[in-house]
Amino acid sequence: MRKRPVPGSGKAGGATRRDPVTQRRERRSPPLLGAEEGMSQAPEARPRSPSVYHERQRLELCAVHALNNVLQEQLFSQEAADEICKRLAPDSRLNPHRSLLGTGNYDVNVIMAALQGLGLAAVWWDRRRPLSQLVLPQVLGLILNLPSPVSLGLLSLPLRRRHWVALRQVDGIYYNLDSKLRAPEALGGEDGVRAFLAAALAQGLCEVLLVVTKEVEEAGCWLHTS
């Protein structure tokens, strides 16, 4: 039986195969991806513990924060996301992949293109499947799209917007890295993250993206079907 690949731990030709994010770190590439000039509007990063990277919300940049939080380092900025938007719709006067106000609010196409640029893939989770079929050890992280209340200062408005949230395992513990949280929220082990996903999916308006390596995507080993 052919062994299923595990992100960052497969071997080929006697050498250890690392996932693309680990390879980028080892090459000590620049900390941000985006325009060649300096990134003047980098997201606010506040690591709440020595081992967990967590960016706090700024403007409507939850997609940028979710990407950096799920990758556990500051790889993307608002400028980088805007560049992706331009590549996705080069001839559009009003870009459909971001807010018309220039404050962010990026759609899923931007997230997918950003991950593809790192050699990773985003796989939609079919909410009709039982979560017991999700093979979490094959998944680098998860990005959820959730309804989120809108506030104006201290005033909560009777409106809801879509919000991107990252979940990631660090040192054996899964964390909710929602950029609207003051600090990472520990969910526990696999049972804890499955319970969190079940509660989110039960709301009916939640979508889940699995962040995996290309190898795992092609093999389909993020899903247990037997």
Image (cartoon, rainbow, N blue to C red):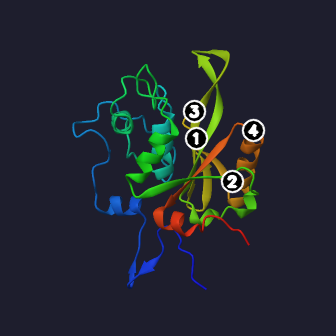
Residues 138 and 22: in front is: 138
The answer to whether 190 appears left or right of 5 in the picture is right
x and y percent of residue 96 in the render? 46, 29
Residue at numbered disc 4: 204
SS for dot 2: helix
Q: What is the number of the mark on residue 165?
A: 1
**Residue 193, visible in the rendered structure:** yes
Q: Is residue 177 left or right of residue 160?
A: left
Disc 3: which residue? 180
Residue under numbered circle 2: 193
Residue visible at 34% across and 59% down?
24
Q: Identify the residue shown where x is 47% and y is 43%.
A: 111
**Pointers 4 and 3 in contact (C-beta within 8 Å):** no
Q: Mark 1 vs mark 3: give the one in front.
A: 1
Question: In which quarter of the view is residue 84 placed?
Answer: top left
Viewport quadrant of the C terminus: bottom right
**Spatial separation of the CA atoms under disc 1 and disc 2:** 13 Å
- Circles 4 and 1 in contact, beta carbons < 8 Å: no
Instruction: Give amino acid for label 1.
Output: Val
